[in-house]
Amino acid sequence: MKYVIYYRVSTKKQGLSGLGLEAQKTIVENYVKNNVVIAEYTEIETGKSANRPELNKALECCKSSNATLIVAKLDRLARNLHFITSLQNSNVDFIACDMPTANRLTIHIIAAIAENEAQLISQRTKQALAEKKKQGVKLGNPKNNGLTEDSISRGRTIRKENALNNEANRKAGTLILSMRNNGSKWSEIVRQLNSSGFRTRRGCLFDTTTSKRLYERYKVITTN
């Protein structure tokens, strides 16, 4: 195999200090082992800029060398709309070390789920606000609604925990969809989920029943 490696760090400080970058390099090196590495590209993102010149270079290098793009972790990259779009349009094969069964089909699934969830969140928010107005709740500054700093802080903590749970479900769901659509048996899917460290929302190991339930949930989302 011929690989082109793409690393990504969030800030210039991380890029200079090696925070995050060294961990990515260790993960990729352990995966690549004795295969050929043609080139390495490191992207330092700042803010919400959609400009990803190093990613574009990496994709061009893959196409000209008939190589596979390899990244350490799919989770953060997959939430980046520019990365998803670029990868879809490039027709380049890729491997994510933390989810080696992922492929271009997985990226399509992730993109569909992310778009659908964004729409659902927007709809639910509008509906909730409209309901609050009907109940006579004054909207606006939380202080005007009698919320204390402690309650605001607890709310933030709960939202963060829910986001983490949803992200874990998304990753498990995309893995199940990808493997199932590629003909994997349920026993193989369950084994892959548990060996990859995935757990249910209650922290339990996956079994066939919970895997099928998650599959049906995300199959509906991606087909609607």
Image (tube, helix red, strand yellow):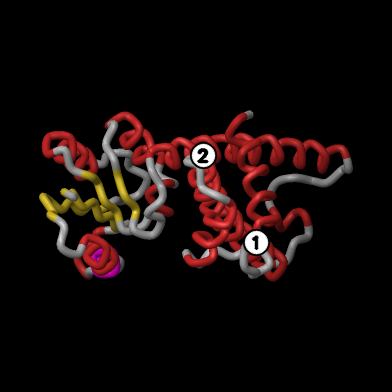
Using the rendered image of the protein, determine whether residue 14 is visible from the camera's viewpoint: no
Q: Is residue 119 left or right of residue 101?
A: right
In terms of secondary structure, what is the magenta stretch mainly? Answer: helix
Percent across and percent down for residue 94 are: 30, 45
**Labelled disc at residue 207:** 1
Q: Quadrant of residue 29?
A: bottom left
Residue placed at 44% from the left, 46% from the top?
79
- How crowded pointer 2 is (Cα within 10 Å; few <14, some 14-19, many 20+) is rated as few
* SS assignment at label 1: loop
Q: Amino acid at mark 1?
A: Asp
Percent across and percent down for residue 149 are: 67, 67
Does the magenta run of residues contain 22?
Answer: yes
Q: Quadrant of residue 166?
A: bottom right
Does the magenta run of residues contain 200?
Answer: no
Q: Nearer the viewer, residue 191 or 136?
A: 191
Residue hosting label 2: 181
Q: Which residues are magenta?
A: 21-25
Q: Is residue 136 above or below residue 43?
A: above
Percent across and percent down for residue 135 are: 88, 43
Mark 2 and mark 1: span between their CA atoms?
A: 18 Å
Q: Amino acid at mark 2?
A: Asn
Residue placed at 30% from the left, 66% from the top?
20
